[in-house]
Image: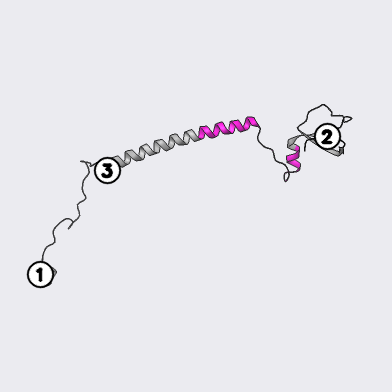
Amino acid sequence: MSSPPHLRAVRYGLQSDYVVYHELIMTSKEFMQCVTSVEAEWLAELGPMFYSIKESLHSIEEGKAKAAERRKQMEQELAEAEEALEAERERQAAPSSSRRAIATPGHNQTPVRTPRRMGF
């Protein structure tokens, strides 16, 4: 609610972000009387269930800049990881002359036809 302080109030003409008032006088306009200026930190400290402190515009802009910088860094890391993965896939897909086959006994040999295997 936005109401100016009453004309007889001590703080009339002074600007304050947060005030606490005792009376609200209803005439053709609303006026606050018995006004006290308070700090935002006081409200957040004494009434955390009702008030919280939001970041200022300056800190919001800093947060956005940090987030954009982090996003760029993550995109660069992703591109490097994709390049490394692609290089690994190409290396594995390319036939290697230095690659040797593992010799296992009985592998890739035609089976010996014995009478026992033939069912005799």
75 relative position to 63: left or right: left
- Are there few (<14), some (14-19), or many (20+) residues within 10 Å of tag 2? some
Mark earlier in primary sequence (1, 2): 2
Q: Residue at x 51, y 34 (%)?
A: 70
Which disc, if any, is residue 36? 2
Boundaries of the magenta span: 42-70
Q: Which residue is mark 1?
A: 115
Compare marks 3 and 1 and give the one earlier in the sequence.
3
Residue at 50% of width from left, 35% of height from top? 71
Q: Is residue 108 magenta?
A: no
The quarter of the displayed image where residue 32 is located: top right
Residue 77 in the image, given as x and y percentages of width and height: 43, 36
Assign a secondary structure to mark 3. helix
Q: Amino acid at mark 3?
A: Ala
Q: Quadrant of the C terminus?
A: bottom left
Amino acid on which the number 1 mark rests in the picture = Pro
Element assignment for label 1: helix
Residue annotated with mark 3: 93
Q: CA distance from mark 1 to mark 2?
A: 110 Å
Amino acid under label 2?
A: Thr
